[in-house]
Image (cartoon, grey):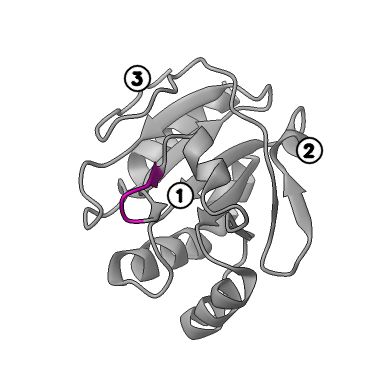
């Protein structure tokens, strides 16, 4: 298994059970992480803010590669500390996304805090990637040091997901 890439810090470690959560998606449907247990791997993509340049590149890049995620039996879930109306406006501005964008809004950042992917002094999330296997175990973590740093390119993400297929 690929060693975790731990840069910006989190108390969670590869091998830990992923904290469960339930959040509303942009369509208002509730999504629970544990609903994927035994069925699919999950890539959680926490990101700082809607309508920002790096985030506006990051999430569409996952949409463009959704078939590869599906081939690797992986559900992509993006989590941002914003309301559903803000998420919907951003999705429209992006030209659509083909995976759920979850609103970690009420109370603000509650799930992001569970993953140490929240910055209280500024009130929004960190950029962070967590890959969770079908058993609900964290298998990969990447938390860049800087908010303006892009996420890792998809190569290490797909490598970690491919290793879960073995």
Residue density around tag 3, few if under 14, some if 14–19, many if 20 or more, within 10 Å: few
Distance, label 2 to label 1, CA atoms, is 19 Å
- Side (left or right) of 128 relative to 100: left
Say whether residue 119 is magenta.
yes
Q: Depth check: 136 or 2 in front? A: 136
The residue at the point 43 percent across, 28 percent down is 140
Q: Tell me whether circle 2 and circle 1 mark residues in contact (CB < 8 Å).
A: no
* Horizontal and vertical percent position of residue 132: 57, 31
Quarter occupied by the C terminus:
top right
Give the extent of the magenta segment. 118-122
Residue placed under numbered mark 3 in the picture: 3
Rounded to the nearest angstrom, the CA distance separating label 1 from label 3 is 20 Å
3 above or below 6?
above
Q: Main secondary structure of the magenta part?
A: loop
- Secondary structure under tag 2 reads helix
Residue drawn 58% across the image and 54% down it? 104
Q: Label 1, on which residue?
A: 46
Foreground disc of the pair 1, 3: 1
Left or right relative to 6: residue 118:
right
Q: Position of residue 117 (x, y in %)?
A: 41, 41
- Nearer the N terminus, badge 2 or badge 3? 3
Asked if the stretch drawn in magenta spans residue 149, the answer is no
From the top left corner, tell me how far across and down residue 86 is, in percent. Answer: 55, 76
Q: CA distance from mark 2 to mark 3?
A: 26 Å
Q: Where does residue 126 sit, x and y in percent of width and height? A: 36, 48
Residue wearing tag 2: 35
Front residue (pair 73, 87):
87
| Residue at image coords 26%, 42% | 144
Number of residues whose C-alpha sits closer than 10 Å to that of mark 2, classed few (under 14), some (14–19) or many (20 or more): few
Assign a secondary structure to mark 1: strand
């Amino acid at each position: 298994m690929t060693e975790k890439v731990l840069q910006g810090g989190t108390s969670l470690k590869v091998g830990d059970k992923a904290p469960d959560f339930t959040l509303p998606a942009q369509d208002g449907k509730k999504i629970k992480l544990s609903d994927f247990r035994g069925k699919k791997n999950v890539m959680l993509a926490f990101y700082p803010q809607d309508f920002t340049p790096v985030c506006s590149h990051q999430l569409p890049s996952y949409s463009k590669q959704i078939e590869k995620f599906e081939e690797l039996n992986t559900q992509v879930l993006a989590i941002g500390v914003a309301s559903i109306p803000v998420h919907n406006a951003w999705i429209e501005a992006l030209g659509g996304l083909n995976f759920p964008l979850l609103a970690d809004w009420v109370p603000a950042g509650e799930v992001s805090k569970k993953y140490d992917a929240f910055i209280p002094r500024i009130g929004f999330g960190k950029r962070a990637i967590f890959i969770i296997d079908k058993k609900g175990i964290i298998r990969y973590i990447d938390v860049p040091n800087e908010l303006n740093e892009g996420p890792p390119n998809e190569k290490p993400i797909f490598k970690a997901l491919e290793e879960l297929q073995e």
